[in-house]
Amino acid sequence: MSQRRRQWGDQPRAPDVVELRVHGVSGADPTVILDQAQVRQVAGDGSGGFHRAARSDADSPDGVTLEAYRWGDLPSGTVGRTLAMVFLLPFMLSNVAVWMRPTGHRRADWVSVLCRLLALNLTVLYVVSIAGVALDLLAWRCLGAARCRGPFDSMAGLDGRHVGQRLAVLALVPLAAIAILRLLGTRRSGPADNPLWAVEPLVHRLRAIHVAAALAVLNVVLLTARRAGGATFGTTLLLALSAAVLLACVGLLAVPGMIDRAATARTATWTARTAGVVAAGLSVATLVIVAGDRRAWLPAAGLPGYGGIAGAALFGQMALLVLLSGVVLWHHGRVGSRSALPGGLGAAVLAAFAVGLTGALSAGLVYQTGDLLGGYRGDGGPPLPYRWTLLAFFLHVVAAVLLCGAMSVVSLRRRRRAAAAITARDFPVVPPEAVGRLRLTTKTIAQARFTEWLGLLAATYAALAVVGLATSLVGGTGRDPEELTRQLFGLPAGAVQMGLSGGSYLLAALLVTLLAGGVFAYRTAWFRRHVGILWDLGTFWPRAAHPFAPPSYADRAVPELADRISQLTERHVGVLLCGHSHGSALLALAVLRLPPRVRQRVALLTYGSPLDRLYARLFPAYLNEEVLREVGERVEWRWLNLWRDTDPVGGWVFAAHRPGDPPPDPADPAGQVDRRLRDPPDLLPAPGERSAPPLRGHHPGECDSEFRAAVRELAERLRGRS
């Protein structure tokens, strides 16, 4: 028995209730969570573990044992992994988008199809852009048609080789990039025997499809260039087979439910694996034929056919995004709006971010590398599709900034009016010396209420996908952007060049920001609290659209929480689960995994929780009101949710209960869950205090009197069951 106590961290005479605290996104130190100078780890490891106070007599004054679960390092862990997430950011965004699909079987299926096709397109464009550097810029231009700056004009003696040999050797660069993606796709973050999400077989199928498509599109680039100088039976056959593999990959994703449903899973798995094997064989044959073909190649400034392939990939990307935006906007218009991002609208928004980032990064890679090496001198610059994409990125960023600014100004009056009504009910009598404090409170509430406008902002941003589609269509005509704008709008060539330069500088700034964010989010706790939120939220969801996205840490965190709760209930009267912000979502999912005998001895306290305000709107098919009510029923409605009007993230789960609102229905237990905390409690300092109570906003506040009162109430309800 003593050995089990040491393993679980229990004391020989432990109190009857354990208060298990789970922090929100961006991590927190256990000493801060527990408000103790010294803590000890009682379970878990360095990435995620359970901690208690180092002193056995340092328990809570409310008669409960304090314990904290720290999961903050699971999404990042090391600098290398964090930086990998920076480079895989577009893949991560496209993967989260599929989880934002709306309710309704048919619409959800089509949103899933479009999200997965977009994810496949991101992989294809990734390969095409690297092929642009290795094959078009280095093998064709620097070592042939144009001379780059040294030493790239004579790389390892390749400048004296035949064109086909140069292409075959430098094709190893995109092949290595595909291999790296394949390696990244095998990573796991959760236990193999007790996962939260049963998606691993789906990940295997998606990985095979993406690798097969990546190899096939590389074959198409090489074979198209070879056939431009004269087609042969071998090159035509290989090109046709590579195109067939690419179409098979698209077909597997385009049929709703083909790779998801149990009835077709076996066929989809076999087809995906076969496509991968065939694509690998075709790649070997393509390299052999290209390297051994001594015939003359078509003289051209750039790799023949490459611009058309890049343009087709970019156009397909924008066409899919417009279709996805149309589906979710149509659904959004039918179901109406309650709050931020309803009806699966988030899928279009995140997909737009993923597409914009991928296109910009691809164009920037080709554009900046060419300028650095001097490979585009005297031949009109990089391929036209990338020039149009970089211009579209600049226009999109400018439009988005103007849109956010306009929305902030337009909504400001209404947000201030609503905030003033709230503070007027909270503080009906305001002394003259508290007017400034009241004004600050009203301003803070007005800022927090901008979240309610995110739905309209997201809908407008999703509609901006038309900008990218228009530039892709115009770029497909083969017209130079400077020439076309001069003819249509009379703008000087310098205006377009300014846009291209602006897009290039914006992209460089974005890359520096992402890299710095990846490093500082790991090394600096303050920076991680503000920037690391993106990684924590993005890697929460498993890989259901893009197999090369970072793996889900929830596969470990939620089962680990459920196991720990089960262990604690065997040694204690009850366990009070306290979840702040995203920690409330982890605990809600853990509650759904608990067996009935454990749930009877569990209570739930959430605070600053985005479960309804954001998550039920962002992920309506998974964290909706029905699921939240099931969580309440599982714990027999021993659930309290604390929220503040000054919080821009958290909110009520079932009802606001503001002063003046109708009383809750006594027959509905969900009406008793939410408790609004007036923030600040008062505008003036309490007797004996020098300063007024601070505005708490999204701050956890485990030491606040309202929080401790909720802990005591739920602990007594647990004790009443013993």
Image (spheres, grey):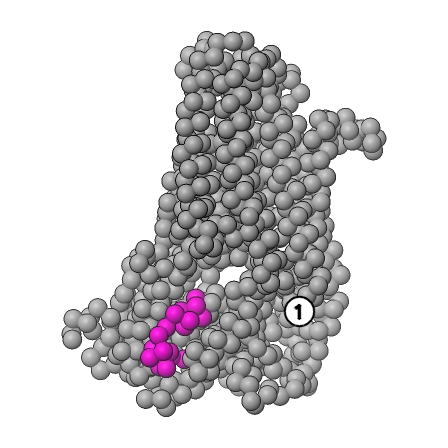
Where residue 19 sits: x, y (%)?
36, 77
Q: Is residue 260 left or right of residue 465?
A: left
Q: Give the tally of numbered discs.
A: 1
- Mark 1 lies on a secondary structure that is loop
Where residue 224 sits: x, y (%)?
56, 22
Q: Quadrant of residue 647?
A: bottom right
Circle 1 Cα neighbour tier, 10 Å, few/some/many (<14 / 14–19 / ≥20): few
Q: Is residue 369 left or right of residue 23?
A: right
Where residue 485 sits: x, y (%)?
78, 31
Where residue 129 sits: x, y (%)?
54, 31
Q: Nearer the viewer, residue 470 or 399?
A: 470
Q: Is residue 428 visible?
A: yes
Residue hosting label 1? 338
Q: Residue at x 24, y 71 (%)?
A: 9
Q: Residue at x 16, y 75 (%)?
A: 1
Q: Quadrant of residue 625?
A: bottom right
Q: Is residue 700 above or below residue 14?
A: above
Q: Is residue 411 above or below residue 398?
A: below
Please give the range of residues in magenta. Answer: 586-603
Callout 1 amino acid = Arg
Give yes or no for residue 562 being in the magenta stretch: no
Q: Nearer the viewer, residue 714 or 179?
A: 179
Q: Is residue 690 visible?
A: no
Dividing the image into 4 quarters, which one contains the C terminus? Answer: bottom left
Give yes or no for residue 600 being in the magenta stretch: yes
